[in-house]
Image (cartoon, rainbow, N blue to C red):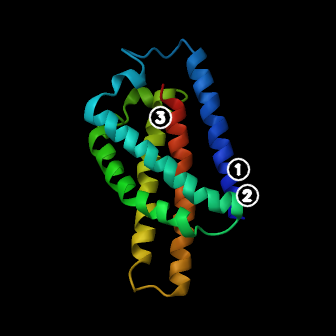
């Protein structure tokens, strides 16, 4: 069941991001001040974005490869790579939150009529940050000797579901950033 949900969710997020990018590129209604997004990122902030993006991509690849392609849980070298990237993801995500929270706060212009691309980008950013908490806590809590087999299975399912939401939000955020 998770294979189907993950395939539909990731496929839908990719299609939505592509459509959003196409509409955003064609639409002259939303003028963006200054340079494109990629040219505005420099220095430490740019490094944090790159590390966060690469860690999300690496974790999504190693996690969803096992779920979507093999249809089973992560094992062997993919699990080692997945666990190695996890602390990098946690630290870079915290740094991204500290450096970018002010930029992605909501204002009145985001809620007028239908949300514009900038409003959807902010929604994706905050969904990504909110979904990161159960992703991280579910695995950290499963390492404690407080849970039995049923509790660990529940935490694993929470991890998978929240990771799917986080991945979809990351795809949307990247698709709406130009």
Image x and y of residue 45, in percent: 29, 35
* Residue identifier under label 1: 8
Name the residue: 70% across, 63% down. Answer: 70
**CB atoms at circles 1 and 2 under 8 Å apart?**
yes
Name the residue: 33% across, 43% down. Answer: 96
| Residue 173 vertical placement versus 9 (above, below) | above
The local secondary structure at tag 3 comes to helix
Q: In which quarter of the image is the N terminus?
A: bottom right
| Residue 96 vertical placement versus 81 (above, below) | above
Of the two numbered discs 1 and 3 in the rendering, the one whose residue sits closer to the viewer: 1
Image x and y of residue 58, in percent: 50, 51
Image x and y of residue 114, in percent: 55, 29
* Residue identifier under label 2: 4
The residue closer to the viewer here, 112 or 133, is 133
* Residue identifier under label 3: 121
Name the residue: 62% across, 69% down. Answer: 73
Q: Earlier in the sequence, mark 1 or mark 3?
A: 1
Kindly report the distance in space between the C-alpha atoms of the residues bearing marks 1 and 2. 6 Å
């Amino acid at each position: 069941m998770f294979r189907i949900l993950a395939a539909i969710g990731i496929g839908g997020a990719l299609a939505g991001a592509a459509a959003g990018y196409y509409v955003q590129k064609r639409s002259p209604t939303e003028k963006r001040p200054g340079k494109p997004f990629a040219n505005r990122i420099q220095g430490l902030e740019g490094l944090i974005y790159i590390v966060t993006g690469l860690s999300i991509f690496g974790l999504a690849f190693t996690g969803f490869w096992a779920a979507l392609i093999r249809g089973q849980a992560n094992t062997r070298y993919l699990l080692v790579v997945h666990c190695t990237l996890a602390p990098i993801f946690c630290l870079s995500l915290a740094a991204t939150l500290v450096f970018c929270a002010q930029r992605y706060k909501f204002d009145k212009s985001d809620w007028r009529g239908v949300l514009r691309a900038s409003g959807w980008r902010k929604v994706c950013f905050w969904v990504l940050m909110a979904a990161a908490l159960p992703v991280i806590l579910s695995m950290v809590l499963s390492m404690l000797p407080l849970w039995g087999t049923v509790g660990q299975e529940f935490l694993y399912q929470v991890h998978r579901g929240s990771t799917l939401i986080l991945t979809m939000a990351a795809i949307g955020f990247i698709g709406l950033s130009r």
